Image: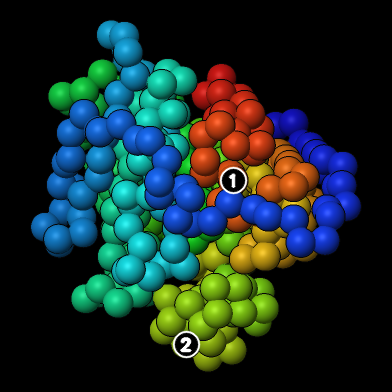
Amino acid sequence: MAVGLFVSCIEVAALGAQTMTFEEVTALRAREPERRVAYGSAPTAFGDLFLPAGAGPHPVVILIHGGCWRSRYDLSHLRPLAGAIADAGFAVWSIEYRRIGDPGGGWPGTFADVAAAADYVRELGRSAPLDTSHVIAAGHSAGGHLALWLAARHQLPALHPLRGGAPLPIDGVVSLAGIPDLTRAAGDKICGTAPGELMGGPPQQLPERYRDGSPSALLPLGVPQWLINGVLDDIVPPSFVEPYARAAVAAGDDARLKLIPHAGHFEVIAPGSIAWPAVIRAIREAGQR
């Protein structure tokens, strides 16, 4: 596998520069999914399937929303992104999952749901024109963590309950302001206290959980990774992601870090934003693997 690390030139932002807000993202125009499908029995065990034009079969993007793994944020704010990716020629499986605040959310329920939703792509392929042999994982913020973890899941021991007998192979990951290192996230208070709440305690008390749930602890992932962050992101700053990108390359992964000048945390999920060309380019590059 080719190994590369690309970091864009960082421009100095003007003091007081404005970036997109969560509310501005939710106000973007969004298309309806073709269908909503349950992948399990829990109320949150469902996903929205968006399909592109044409007969297919279409490569698949498993899309995972963020929100600091907390239940007050759901998949609805990624509808504009999901529709735009589908318009670019991909089937998009935008998934919901148990989160902090949901019964069974956190460790291991959040991870188990994301794994089950990913493996359900094979079942979706029975009734939808999907190329289930060509699957990309993409996610934003906490969803970026879970997208990277999906690609790393095959690294877990064979009998690990979160691995499963046949994890769906992931061909590439596009992490949008993702959180790849849970141990550092807990120490740096990325998303406040959420990393510790997700895992049920701090890394010092639960090292095995953090080892099995953190992509940084499971390197090399063995798949190409596109890591896209806004220079002005104050939720998941570039300085948090850069060490992971270097570690991934050092471990032998093809990891490409792209920093977007003048962008914050939400431009990376907003079609038409300053970050959008880099985002859709990364998804298309992953789709060509």
Q: Is residue 249 above or below residue 87?
A: below
**Picture quadrant where residue 89 is located:** top left
Residue 11, position in %: x, y? 87, 47
Residue 164, position in %: x, y? 32, 54
Residue found at x 66% / y 32%: 278
Instruction: Find the residue positioned furthest to the left.
Output: 41
Residue found at x 21% / y 29%: 34
Residue type (three-letter) at the residue carrying disc 2: Gly
Residue 187, position in %: x, y? 65, 82
Residue mark closest to the camera, 1 vs 2: 1
Residue 167 visible? The answer is: no
Marks 1 and 2 in Cβ contact (< 8 Å): no
Q: Is residue 154 above or below residue 272?
A: below
Residue type (three-letter) at the residue carrying disc 1: Glu
Residue 267 badge: 1
Query: In this view of the protein, which residue sits in the foreground, 186 or 25?
Result: 25
Residue 201 badge: 2
Residue 226 visible? The answer is: yes
Instruction: Find the residue positioned furthest to the bottom.
Output: 205
